[in-house]
Amino acid sequence: MKRLALLLLLAGCDDMPQARTEAEIREISKTAARDDIAMLQARMADLENRLELVEGEAKVAKVTAEVTASAHDSLVNTFNSNVRKDNEDAVRDMTRRGACGREWLQDENGNYFQTNKACTMADLKK
């Protein structure tokens, strides 16, 4: 019974490997090494291409960020200038209306007269 099982087991196996000469083994090794080198060079070229793409995208992102920051700064400066002008106009209007009170001043001839007191930005915040 054991012999039959062993015979069936051996019958299912592939042919026994052939003995190879040293030259054949070296040629197989060289071919495998060349294939590995070619595969690694292709992989390296792919990675270099991806790196160039990522670096290009990073440059574009940097320029976009700089342009966006510059545009933002410009808008902030414009807004601040507009607010400052509006505040100065409001202070002048307050002075014209006498919102900060009246005061007595003396002219160069020594005459006294009453005028609106000049308002300041601090008065605008009250």
Image (spheres, helix red, strand yellow):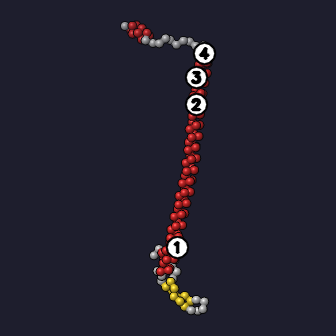
Amino acid at pointer 2 = Ala
Q: Nearer the viewer, residue 22 or 41?
A: 41
Q: Earlier in the sequence, mark 3 or mark 4?
A: 4
Q: Nearer the viewer, residue 44 or 12?
A: 44
Residue positioned 54% across, 57% down in the render? 71
Question: CA separation, marks 3 and 4?
Answer: 12 Å
In front: mark 2 or mark 4?
Answer: 2
Find the residue positioned furthest to the left: 1
Q: Is residue 100 visible?
A: no
Question: CA separation, marks 2 and 4?
Answer: 27 Å
Residue 104 to residue 63: above or below:
below
The residue tagged 1 is 88
Residue 71 to residue 34: above or below:
below
Residue 14 to residue 90: above or below:
above
Amino acid at pointer 1 = Glu
The residue tagged 3 is 32
In the image, residue 42 lies at what x, y percent? 58, 31
The residue tagged 2 is 42
Question: CA separation, marks 1 and 3?
Answer: 83 Å
In front: mark 1 or mark 2?
Answer: 1
In the image, residue 62 lies at what x, y percent? 57, 49
Amino acid at pointer 3 = Ala
Q: Earlier in the sequence, mark 3 or mark 2?
A: 3
Q: Are marks 1 and 4 in contact (CB under 8 Å)?
A: no
| Crowd class of label 3 (few under 14; some 14 to 19; many from 20; radius 10 Å) | few
Amino acid at pointer 4 = Glu
Q: Are marks 1 and 3 in contact (CB under 8 Å)?
A: no
Q: Earlier in the sequence, mark 1 or mark 4?
A: 4
**Which numbered tag is attached to residue 24?**
4
Find the residue positioned furthest to the bottom: 110
Q: Quadrant of the C terminus?
A: bottom left
Q: Earlier in the sequence, mark 1 or mark 2?
A: 2
